[in-house]
Image (cartoon, rainbow, N blue to C red):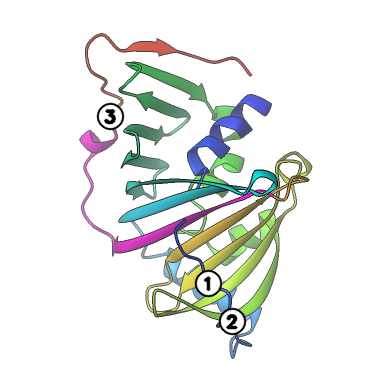
C-alpha cells in the first residue's frame, strides 16, 4: 500500500496561484452542493484541461512547478502529459497506473487493482464524483464561496476517512466552479510535514470525444519496463 500511495502522490504532486483572500460565506448549504454534484455526475463523461502543479516544501521554502495537459474519461481512464520543465506521461487505465519518463526511456507500471476505489478518490477527485462519493470517503465541510481565475467557486474541505490515506494526506481543499461544476483547483495537505501541493486547472472542456487509442499504454521502442514492488 505504501508503494501505491507514493505513486498516487507522485501523480498529484502540484500551482501557480490559489485563492484565499476573497473567500466569503456561502449562500449554498452543504446538502445543496452535494445534491447538485449528484445531478451533474449523471451527465459527466470526459474532460480535457491544462494543468499547473506545484509542490511546496515548507521547511526549506521550496516550490517546484510542472505543467501540461490532462485527459480524463469517466470509465477509470486518465492521461497526463507533462511538458514543463521535463516531459513525462502518467497514464491510468483500469487497474494499471503507468509513469513514463522519456529522458530515461523507462516506464514504471503499478497495479492498483486492490486499491482501485481509493486511488480513484485522488486521481479523479471532483471529476464526475457524486455527493454520495464524497460523503462516503470524506468528512465534508463547506468553507464558503471563493474566486479562482475570476470564476465563482464553492470551496469544500475533505478529510479522508481512511486511516491509511489520512496518514499521507491530512485534508484536501476542493474549489468547484459553480458554472460548470468542475474542479478548478485542488490543494492537498500532507500529514505531519506542513507541506502541500496544489493542482490548478484551466481551459477546461467538459465531455469532449476521447478515443480508446488515447489511453493505450504504447511506449517507444527501447523503453525499459519495470514494476516497482510495494
- In the image, taking residue 196 as reference, residue 48 lies left or right, namely left
Identify the residue shown where x is 33% and y is 56%.
45
Q: Are marks 3 and 2 in contact (CB under 8 Å)?
A: no
Residue extending farthest bottom: 27
Quarter holding residue 77: top left
- In the image, taking residue 131 as reference, residue 58 lies left or right, namely right
Q: How would you rate the neighbour count of disc 1 (Cα within 10 Å): few for under 14, some for 14-19, many for 20 or more?
A: some
Which of the pair 111/70 is nearer the observer?
70
Q: How would you rate the neighbour count of disc 3 (Cα within 10 Å): few for under 14, some for 14-19, many for 20 or more?
A: few
* Residue 71: x %, y % from top left: 31, 47
Q: Secondary structure at mark 2?
A: loop
Q: Which residues are magenta?
A: 195-215
Dot placed on the residue nearer the N-terminal end, 1 or 3: 1
Gap in angstroms between the C-alphas marked 1 and 3: 36 Å
Identify the residue shown where x is 26% and y is 8%.
222
* Residue 220: x %, y % from top left: 23, 17
Q: Is residue 183 found inside the magenta-colored segment of the image? A: no
Which of the pair 195/12 is nearer the observer?
195
* Residue 213: x %, y % from top left: 21, 34
Location of mark 1 (residue) = 19
Location of mark 3 (residue) = 216
Q: Are marks 1 and 2 in contact (CB under 8 Å)?
A: yes
Residue 127 against residue 90 in the figure, above or below: below
Location of mark 2 (residue) = 23
Dot placed on the residue nearer the N-terminal end, 3 or 2: 2
| Residue 47 visible from this viewpoint | no
- In the image, taking residue 66 as reference, residue 175 lies left or right, namely right
Q: Are marks 1 and 3 in contact (CB under 8 Å)?
A: no
Quarter holding residue 103: top left
Amino acid at each position: 500500500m505504501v508503494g501505491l500511495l507514493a505513486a498516487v502522490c507522485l501523480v498529484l504532486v502540484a500551482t501557480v496561484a490559489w485563492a484565499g483572500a476573497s473567500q466569503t460565506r456561502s449562500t449554498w448549504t452543504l446538502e445543496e452542493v452535494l445534491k447538485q454534484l449528484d445531478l451533474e455526475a449523471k451527465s459527466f463523461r470526459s474532460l480535457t484541461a491544462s494543468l499547473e502543479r506545484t509542490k511546496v516544501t515548507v521547511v526549506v521554502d521550496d516550490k517546484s512547478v510542472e505543467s501540461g495537459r490532462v485527459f480524463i474519461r469517466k470509465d477509470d481512464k486518465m492521461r497526463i502529459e507533462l511538458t514543463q520543465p521535463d516531459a513525462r506521461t502518467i497514464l491510468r487505465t483500469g487497474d494499471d497506473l503507468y509513469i513514463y519518463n522519456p529522458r530515461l526511456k523507462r516506464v514504471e507500471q503499478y497495479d492498483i487493482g486492490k486499491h482501485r476505489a481509493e486511488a480513484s478518490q485522488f486521481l479523479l477527485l471532483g471529476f464526475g464524483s457524486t455527493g454520495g462519493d464524497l460523503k462516503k470517503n470524506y468528512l465534508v465541510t463547506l468553507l464558503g464561496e471563493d474566486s479562482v481565475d475570476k470564476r465563482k467557486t464553492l470551496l469544500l474541505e475533505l478529510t479522508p476517512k481512511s486511516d491509511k490515506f489520512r496518514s499521507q494526506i491530512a485534508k484536501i481543499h476542493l474549489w468547484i466552479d459553480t458554472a460548470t461544476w468542475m474542479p478548478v483547483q485542488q490543494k492537498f495537505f500532507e500529514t505531519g510535514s506542513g507541506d502541500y501541493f496544489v493542482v490548478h486547472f484551466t481551459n477546461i472542456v467538459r465531455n469532449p470525444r476521447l478515443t480508446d487509442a488515447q489511453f493505450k499504454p504504447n511506449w517507444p521502442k527501447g523503453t525499459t519496463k519495470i514494476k516497482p514492488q510495494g
